[in-house]
Image (spheres, helix red, strand yellow):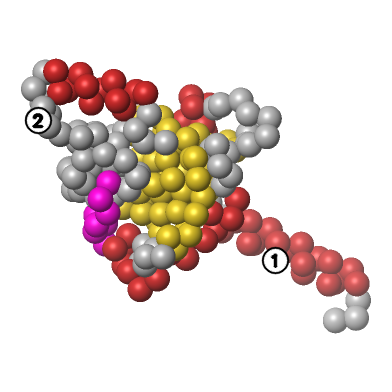
Amino acid sequence: MKNPLIRFVLSALLFSTLLSFAPAKNSFRELRKRTIAKKFRISNNTNPYYIIVSKKDYELNVYDDEGWYATYPIVFGSKDLSDKMREGDKRTPTGTFKIILKKINKKWGRELLLDYPNAESIRRFNERKAKGLVPKNARIGNGIAIHATRKEEEWTVDNFYNWTDGCVSVKYSEMEDLYSYIPVGTPVTIQP
């Protein structure tokens, strides 16, 4: 096609056809994510990101200053998605945390370590101990992170197979992406 006008018209038709297959901008899911983003927005001039983990949806959602940024499917430790009660229960804690360290783990690669237990986690743990909900000799635990599966075990996420000791696990290949742009200090809210 040597005629530039014909080439332009055909390009415009192709572009408009492709747009018609794109998902609607105001879908329910998109509106829900924008609402969540506004609710949890944290003002931070140097780090535009924050993470919301939804246990019930098995999703890790990343937000930036403009709203929803990315979603990653995830798994946890226990099928019991309630709050972590004590060390060894394999449950993932709920609450608000922050990423305190980025490192490479020799078992599963990239890892974003959370500040668990933080003051709120310790308060809840001591309260439960006082009420007899947790044994007197129980410990709160530590070492909760967002980390990858092993390379050959991405199927665990596809099959909702909870395998960690209470951490949040992302597919190995997708954790490379998340790790590449999320800085230390990023707030993380883990919801039931």
Q: Is residue 46 above or below residue 113?
A: above
- The residue lying at 32 percent from left, 60 percent from top is 157
Secondary structure of the residue carrying tag 1 is helix
Q: Main secondary structure of the magenta part?
A: loop
State how far apart marks 2 and 1 are (Cα).
66 Å
On the image, the x and y values in percent for residue 15 come to 70, 62
- The residue lying at 36 percent from left, 54 percent from top is 169
Residue on which disc 2 sits = 135
Left or right position of 66 against 135: right
Mark whose residue sits in front, 2 or 1: 2
Secondary structure of the residue carrying tag 2 is loop
On the image, the x and y values in percent for residue 159 come to 26, 62
On the image, the x and y values in percent for residue 50 come to 53, 37
Residue on which disc 1 sits = 14
Q: Which residue range is magenta in the image?
A: 159-166
Label pair 2/1, CB-CB below 8 angstroms: no
Residue 81 visible in this rendered orientation of the protein: no
Check residue 161 for magenta coloring. Answer: yes
Q: Is residue 66 above or below residue 11?
A: above
In the image, 186 versus 50, the foreground residue is 186
